[in-house]
């Protein structure tokens, strides 16, 4: 089953949130319904990127990789489609 990495941007303050899910539409709805503690009361949210991976395990690893970078620039490269994923994430 494929997995997805998604990036949300807050319409309120412009901050990004990186996450992963098997069903990104359902997860996006949860974020905007304030059902996710990490994004509660920080929205509304726009989904600005969605990347598909072969499995949810790959998507979780990609999420962890992006979060470890702690870089707005890398997040913006993923959003623009210009980010070059390391070999371990090649799809």
Image: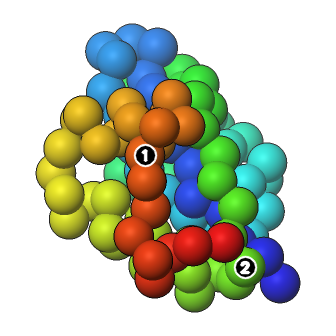
* In-front residue for pair 12/74: 74
* In-front residue for pair 45/84: 84
The residue drawn where x is 32% and y is 59% is 66
The residue drawn where x is 35% and y is 40% is 75
Label drawn at residue 54: 2
Q: Is residue 47 above or below residue 60?
A: above
The residue drawn where x is 72% and y is 42% is 29
Label drawn at residue 83: 1
Q: Is residue 15 above or below residue 53?
A: above
Would you say residue 71 is visible in this rendering?
yes
Quarter placement of the N terminus: bottom right
**In the picture, residue 57 is in which quadrant?**
bottom right
Q: If you read the primary sequence from the N terminus, does the residue marked by circle 1 or circle 2 appear first?
A: 2
Q: Is residue 13 left or right of residue 91?
A: left
**In the picture, residue 3 is in which quadrant?**
bottom right
10 Å neighbourhood of mark 1: few (<14), some, or many (≥20)? Answer: few
């Amino acid at each position: 089953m494929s997995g997805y990495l998604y990036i949300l941007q807050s319409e309120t303050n412009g901050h990004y949130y990186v996450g992963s899910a098997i069903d990104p539409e359902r997860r996006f709805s949860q974020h905007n319904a304030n059902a996710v503690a990490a994004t509660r009361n920080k929205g509304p949210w726009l989904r600005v990127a969605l990347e598909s991976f072969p499995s949810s395990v790959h998507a979780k690893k990609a999420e962890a990789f992006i979060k470890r970078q702690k870089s707005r620039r890398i997040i913006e490269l993923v959003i623009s489609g210009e980010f070059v994923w390391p070999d371990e994430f090649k799809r």
